[in-house]
């Protein structure tokens, strides 16, 4: 099985674990003397087997990913950086320079005075950074996908 297949299997087994955990919670209490639809000890046994399979898959995937750890870390960090720059671009919209009125108290009197606010990094630069990061993320992901399809676990 290659990494791509192992990742799909890991997700499937993780879903099975979650389902069995929920079933165990629901079936743990029953009316005394009434036969349960699912027996807690059988569910617990299935859950233990599924958890062990999930752990084994995760270990095998991590070992197989050893050859692309740097790409995985760079991908993760670039995605975090992308989220920051997307938010930054949304915050600093509009003109790079604008005048706002600010209240100033002088001798007990409030006066509104104009202040010029400027953005050191404008929206265009932030969007450029977003585009650059998205391009790098796509490249990392393509390389990781190729590795995952060709590397056995």
Image (cartoon, helix red, strand yellow):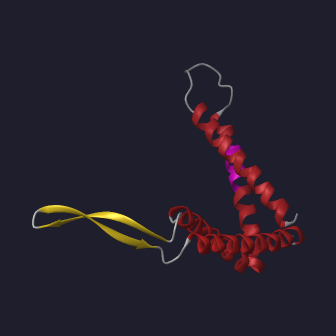
Give the camera-side residue of 147 and 27: 147
Residue furthest out toward the top: 33
Count of labels in the image: 0
Dividing the picture into quarters, in which one does residue 116 lie?
bottom left
- One can see residue 153 in this view: no
Give the camera-side residue of 107 and 22: 107
Q: Is residue 9 left or right of residue 74?
A: right
Q: Magenta span covers which residues?
A: 45-52
Give the camera-side residue of 127 and 33: 127
Q: Residue at x 61, y 71 (%)?
A: 124
Give the camera-side residue of 43 and 1: 1
Q: Is residue 36 left or right of residue 12?
A: left
Dividing the picture into quarters, in which one does residue 65 lie?
bottom right
Q: Residue at x 59, y 72 (%)?
A: 126
Q: Is residue 46 magenta?
A: yes
Q: Residue at x 65, y 70 (%)?
A: 130
Dividing the picture into quarters, in which one does residue 77 lie?
bottom right
Horizontal and vertical percent position of residue 34: 61, 19
Horizontal and vertical percent position of residue 143: 82, 74
Residue furthest out toward the left: 107
- One can see residue 35 in this view: yes
**Would you place residue 49 above or below residue 72 in this image?**
above
Horizontal and vertical percent position of residue 72: 71, 73
Q: Is residue 130 left or right of residue 121?
A: right
For the stretch drawn in magenta, the main secondary structure is: helix
**Quarter that holds the N terminus:** bottom right
């Amino acid at each position: 099985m290659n990494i791509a297949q192992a990742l799909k299997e890991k997700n499937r087994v993780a879903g099975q674990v979650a389902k069995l955990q929920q079933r165990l919670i629901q079936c743990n209490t029953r009316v005394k003397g009434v036969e349960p639809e699912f027996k807690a000890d059988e569910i617990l046994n299935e859950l233990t087997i599924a958890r062990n399979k999930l752990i084994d898959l995760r270990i095998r995937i991590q070992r197989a990913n050893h050859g692309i750890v740097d790409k995985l870390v760079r991908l993760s960090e670039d995605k975090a950086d992308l989220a920051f720059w997307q938010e930054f671009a949304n915050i600093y919209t509009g003109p790079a320079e604008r005048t706002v009125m600010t209240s100033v108290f002088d001798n007990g009197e409030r006066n509104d005075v104009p202040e010029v606010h400027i953005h050191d990094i404008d929206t265009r630069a932030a969007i450029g950074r977003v585009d650059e990061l998205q391009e790098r993320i796509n490249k990392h992901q393509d390389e990781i996908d190729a590795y995952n399809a060709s590397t056995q676990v």
